[in-house]
Amino acid sequence: MTQKPRTLFEKVWDSHVVIQEEGHPAILYIDAHLIHEVTTPQAFTGLKERSLPVFRKERTWATTDHNTPTKDQDKPIKEPLSRTQVETLLRNCKDFDIRIYPLGHQYQGIVHMIGPELGITKPGMTIVCGDSHTSTHGAFGAIAFGIGTSEVEEVLGTQNILQYKSKTMNIKINGTLGKGVVSKDIILYIISKIGTNGGIGYFVEYSGTAIENLSMEARMTICNMSIEMGARGGMIAPDETTYKYIKGRNFAPKGKKFDEAVKYWKTLPSDKDAKFDKELEIKAEDIEPMITYGTNPGMGVKITGSVPTIEDFSIEQDRNMFAKAMAYMDLKPGQKMIGQKVDNVFIGSCTNARIEDFRMVAKIVKGKKKPDWLSVMIVPGSTQVALQAKEEGLDKIFKEAGMDFRGAGCSACLGMNEDKIPAKNYCVSTSNRNFEGRQGPGARTMLASPLTAAAVAVTGYVTDVREML
Amino acid sequence: MRNKQIFRKLQSTAVPLPMENVDTDQIIPARFLKGVTNEGYGEFLFRDWRFNDDGSEKENFVLNDKTYKGKILITGPSFGIGSSREHAAWAIADYGFRVVVSSQFGDIFKNNCLNNFLLPVEVSSEFLNELFTAVDSDPEVLIDVDLENLTISIPSKNLSEKFEINPYKRMCLMNGYDDIDYILSKQKEVEEFEKTRKNDFSI
């Protein structure tokens, strides 16, 4: 029996379609649903109004992350609205009998941290969450995407979601990454090339030798930011690196079942002759450490580069967008990025708050001090990472450098909890979005890798980390 | 539960927002996502573009310009990218819009609109420009959006364009159905799927 060659996405998709009626979207079965306090209260209200239970509570995991403070985590949340939202999730999880890892629990953390960490995230699965960075989980060869609150209600109530099949794109990155170039630079480079809308309507598979050589943590950073080019999600084919990462984690299959799983997972990578709707090729050698200068993640340049000038844009709308970004960022068109003075450094978020990121940062800052004017916040993505960092003594390295190592949470990535970047401050951030006001009203974000952020953390200026390696 | 407002036809003036790549953090900043209901978000719509820090209105923002009003919001390309927050759709609907027009929408935002009976109309770049020009030269110009015939038109200019929408979603909007109703009607198939599926190592 010969079957049409299929992509990784198509294989996982096909195995989860419950029914696809003519003229309808597919009913797609969801294997794991991650929930948090911000995008669920209205969904639970909806379930109550419909008198529906949670259909498969064993496939649902809850945590608190967006609203939670990263200081004094053992005390009640000060801000009343944040507290109410967190308490609402606790109550809903109790009412609907859903497992939850709230603040204070050793498994608490950003939803996209805890899925992989606990072995919930595995190849061949469908995973959703009311958060656009759900694309992170695609690093394991899962179909994972962000959904709205109505869809959270839909998945809670039915364990299924109505979906249109996305188009597929393959971004192949072959070659060897240069010194000081890490996975964050790969994804910032891609988005700077194809723009914030280049992926709309697509599920992107990242492949090629440069991807194969990455750790799981580095792969997650890439898939995490797929949404920043508009893609529905990102995926990377599972391989030995993936299986090794999963083995032994809490929700991973055990013993013989694990071997069976690996046997199945090995069938998932895209077939040799599988057709993608779009293909892109990038040479790893072309990628340098990246930094953004503007107000969307596509406005990025190599660190040794300059802010563009209005003449670099041919379309009027792009010119307007550039002018607006310059007004907000208060940078000069044509200026060099290197040497730009910085006020804050934020190392954290579901993009770059894993133990590997902190080890990278610690290597650079060890034995150095941050400049007086600079505020440096280092926020682990999960309590597990916080504990691990302490075990390895990384927290001491950061403290000795005058940097603030905090408790786990989304922190200053999104200007929702107590951690915000003050207006007009320049912040080099390892997070995923440099939108206007994202890190707090008026905050000026420059996205970069943890390595680059570490270099800035000890110099106070945009710096080429390669000079420190 | 969402307010199931049936949508068939609408004639209205429009509010133009000719900006590209408007992300959902601009539509509603994260610090206003702390509610536990889906009501009352209209006052936070485009909060930081619309109001100064002291709460006073910013003069040059279109929602503060009395010249423009109506139930249709016309926006630049790639509208609603970024965060999945459904609050963005709630804010637009709560403010009083029933239709958002662009040449391209962020995927999640588009779904969120449809799930809230807020109609996202995707038009060609040319027609989008026609709309901006028409509203710019006459803020009172009426625009027709017809979901039955899938057309958007400017009757006074004799301009019209077809738009596409999935037939299923169109049926939902026109009849007040939602996705949960549909999936629940397939409960038997779902349970059969669970019983017969192979290679499930997820839990």
Image (spheres, coloured by chain):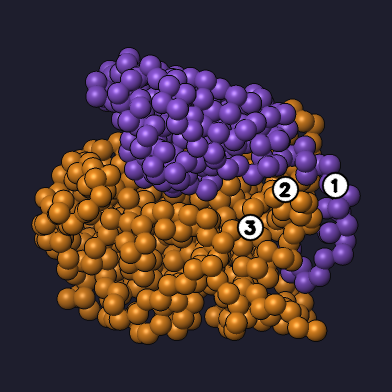
Element type where label 1 sits in the image: helix
Q: CA distance from mark 1 to mark 3?
A: 21 Å
Q: Quadrant of residue B37?
A: top right
In the rendered image, is residue B109 in sight? yes
Mark 1 — on which chain does it sit? B
Chain A palette colour = orange
Residue identifier under label 3: A165
Residue identifier under label 2: A24
Q: Are marks 2 and 3 in contact (CB under 8 Å)?
A: no
**Residue A289 x/y as whole percent:** 26, 70
Q: Give the vertical position of B121 relative to A277 (above or below).
A: above
- Please indicate whether residue A141 sits to the left or right of residue B68 in the image: right
Element type where label 2 sits in the image: loop
Residue at 62% x, 68% y is: A9
Residue at 46% x, 81% y is: A208
Q: CA distance from mark 2 to mark 3?
A: 11 Å
Asked if both marks, 2 and 1, belong to the same chain, the answer given is no
Residue at 81% x, 70% y is: B198
Q: Residues within 10 Å of mark 1 (few under 14, many from 20)?
A: few
Mark 3 — on which chain does it sit? A
Chain B palette colour = purple
Q: Give the vertical position of A445 relative to B131 (above or below).
A: below
**Residue B16 x/y as whole percent:** 36, 28
Q: Are marks 1 and 3 in contact (CB under 8 Å)?
A: no
How many numbered badges does the structure rendering display? 3
Q: Are marks 2 and 1 in contact (CB under 8 Å)?
A: no
Residue identifier under label 1: B187
Residue at 45% x, 27% y is: B158
Q: Residues within 10 Å of mark 2 (few under 14, many from 20)?
A: some
